[in-house]
Structures are given as structure tokens and as C-alpha cells.
Image (cartoon, grey):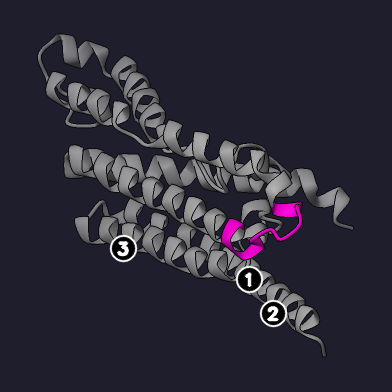
Amino acid sequence: MNPSSSSSSSSSSSCVGFAEFYETWFSELQRVVQELRGSRRVEAMEKVMRHHHKYYAEKSLAAEKDPLAVFLSPWATALERSLHWISGWRPTTAFHLVYTESSLLFESHIIDILQGHRTGDLGDLSPAQLRRFSDLQCLTEENALTEELSEWQDSVSEIMGPGAAFSEKIGRLVRIIKRADNLRLRTLRSVVGLLSPQQAIEFLIASAELLLGIRGWGLNHDRPYRK
């Protein structure tokens, strides 16, 4: 077997391995979120956070082995891929989700709130929390990473040119993917850190339901094409 064939086989193996992990991870996410929904305990919330951390740790290893496959994410559905930003969800999506859930709960509890009753949920975000969310959203590195990816894509002529340092260019893509995933995880932690335990639990349930809902809808959409 020649070196290129060996590399292709290793890459294919790593793709299959992560695809299997991806399926298992979503099944486990559903289980840990059901536990969180039922118990509403901090311990269950921490289990959900560890589950997210495990995902990015595994994805980091997969990106080192085959960054192009990770970037394309063939294990994801067409719907998931259509929403991807550097092989995953946009960090600012977390803030949009908080605002959406907060607005919905605020409207459902508006009479109680107007009467001075505190609900303590996401519909009861304090002015200080809202300011901190706004400040944190402005500090995300999303735009900088988007520009870095654009520069990488613009360098395709260098990748294909004579004497091109292909491994160096691919290594840069690995770093971009890892930085994007690190930003996603840090954003998740930061949002949870700005919320009360009750609010954080509601946010993690909502975010998991969004991921699971998109995944489920995407699988139903893709099913006719996978036969």
C-alpha cells in the first residue's frame, strides 16, 4: 500500500469513527437533557455541560486527522450543514436563543411581572444581566474567524500552486476549526455563567431542544435521499 492510499484509508476510518460518535452523542444528549428536565438540579446541568465538552474534545481529535471531512461534516444532515458556521453553530446563536426564550416567557408571565412578582426564569432577566449579555456578545471573535476563513479560502491558488506547502495550509484550517469550537464552548460557558441556576437550566434545555429538533427534522428530510 502506498503512502497516499494509507492516508486515505486512515482518513476514511476517522470519518466513520466520528460519524458513529456523532450519532451516539445525540442519543446521549437526549437522555441527559431528559434527566435535567426531570430533576432541575445543578448536578444534571453540569452533566449536560460535560457532554458538550466531550463533543468538542472528540471533534478536535477528528479535525487533526481529517480537517476537510470535519469542515464538510458528511455525518450531519443537509439542514444542519445549511446552518453551519465553520462546521458548527454560530456562537451568537446562544445569545439569540436567550433573548427569544426570555421574550416568550416574559409575555406568558407579564401579568405576574406587572404585579411585582418575580418568576426567576429566563423571562425575568435583570437589566444588569441584559447589559452583560450585550457586552459579551460584542466581545465574540466570530467576525475575526469569519475573516480568517475567508483569507484561507482565498489562498486556494497557493494550495494548488507549484511547491505549495499543502500541509501548512491544511494545518491552518485545523487551527481555524479548533478556534471556532473553542469559541462555541466558551460562549456556552459564559452564557450559563451569567444566568441563575434556574435560568441556566432553562437555557440548556432550550438549546438542546433546538439541536435535537434541527437534527430530527434534517433526518426526516434526508431519508428519501439515503435509500
Q: Which residue is mark 1?
A: 20
Whether residue 93 is visible = no
Q: Nearer the viewer, residue 64 or 103?
A: 64
Q: Quadrant of the N terminus?
A: bottom right
Query: Which mark, by number, is residue 47?
Result: 3
Whether residue 36 is visible = yes
**N-terminal of the two: label 3 or label 1?**
1
Q: CA distance from mark 1 to mark 2?
A: 16 Å
Place residue 4 in its image quadrant.
bottom right
Helix, strand or loop under label 1: helix
Is 110 contained in the magenta span?
Answer: no
Residue 24 on image: x %, y %: 56, 68
Q: Which residues are magenta?
A: 159-169
Query: Which mark, by number, is residue 76?
Result: none
Residue in the picture at 26% in, 59% down: 46
Residue in the picture at 37% in, 46% down: 183
**N-terminal of the two: label 2 or label 3?**
2
Residue in the picture at 42% in, 42% down: 207
Residue 135 on image: x %, y %: 23, 25
In this view, the mark in front (1 or 2) = 2
The total of numbered circles placed on residues is 3
What amino acid type should be assigned to the residue bearing mark 1?
Answer: Glu
